[in-house]
Image (spheres, grey):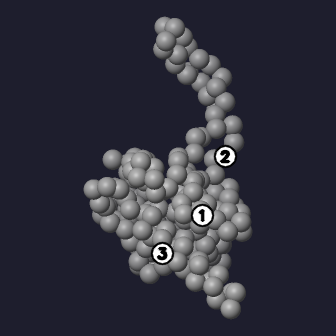
Amino acid sequence: MSLEDDINASNQYYLAKGNAVIHKKPTPIQIVKVDYPKRSAAVIKEAYFRQASTTDYNGVYKGYYLDFEAKETKNKLSFPLKNFHDHQIVHMQQCIEQHAICFVIMRFTTSERLFLLEASHLIEYWNNQYQDGRKSIPLKELEKSGYEMYYELSPRIPYLKVVDQLIAKLENVNTLAIE
């Protein structure tokens, strides 16, 4: 199964249980040419992306807006930043500025290791590549600044357990700000 398939299955589980409403965002396309071999079987022959997509998923959990991306790599020791695009980083920064919980779920396909990395850390690595030239996030760094997750039966990827930790951290910061 692909990472997105696993996340989609997890989201279906969360929705069925009434835990969260999180969906994959459709990619906006412009259909140019359609073939109709049969009335009930239209086939898209030519289409273009209308605009650059932002992130893969968004939704609501415990009253918090979630926005996140899902990425995979075959690399064993680092996660390439080239897997991300400028417009995605800008979108994540804008979501953070609006107090969204924004992150990326990363999978190392060869080792089947999964990490959730807050978007603020990703943005930091993204910006640092222009200063120090490092074009990837070392696995050791992900082990320190990310949250490793492990596959389960249901949900397949229990990422809301980590989101609960992010919410607790956020609420703790808000409590300290009030005091």
Whether residue 143 is visible here, answered yes or no, is yes
Q: Which residue is mark 1?
A: 64
- Disc 1/disc 2 C-alpha distance (Å): 25 Å
Q: Amino acid at mark 1?
A: Tyr
On residue 52, the disc is 2
Q: Residue at x 67, y 68 (%)?
A: 99
Q: Which residue is mark 3?
A: 165
User: 85 left or right of 165?
Assistant: right
Residue 160: name its quadrant.
Answer: bottom left
- Disc 3/disc 1 C-alpha distance (Å): 13 Å
Find the residue positioned furthest to the front: 18
The residue carrying pointer 1 sits among few (fewer than 14), some (14 to 19) or many (20 or more) residues within 10 Å by Cα, namely some
Q: Residue at x 61, y 28 (%)?
A: 47
Q: Amino acid at mark 3?
A: Gln
Whether residue 138 is visible here, answered yes or no, is no
Q: Nearer the viewer, mark 3 or mark 2?
A: 3
Residue 138: name its quadrant.
Answer: bottom left
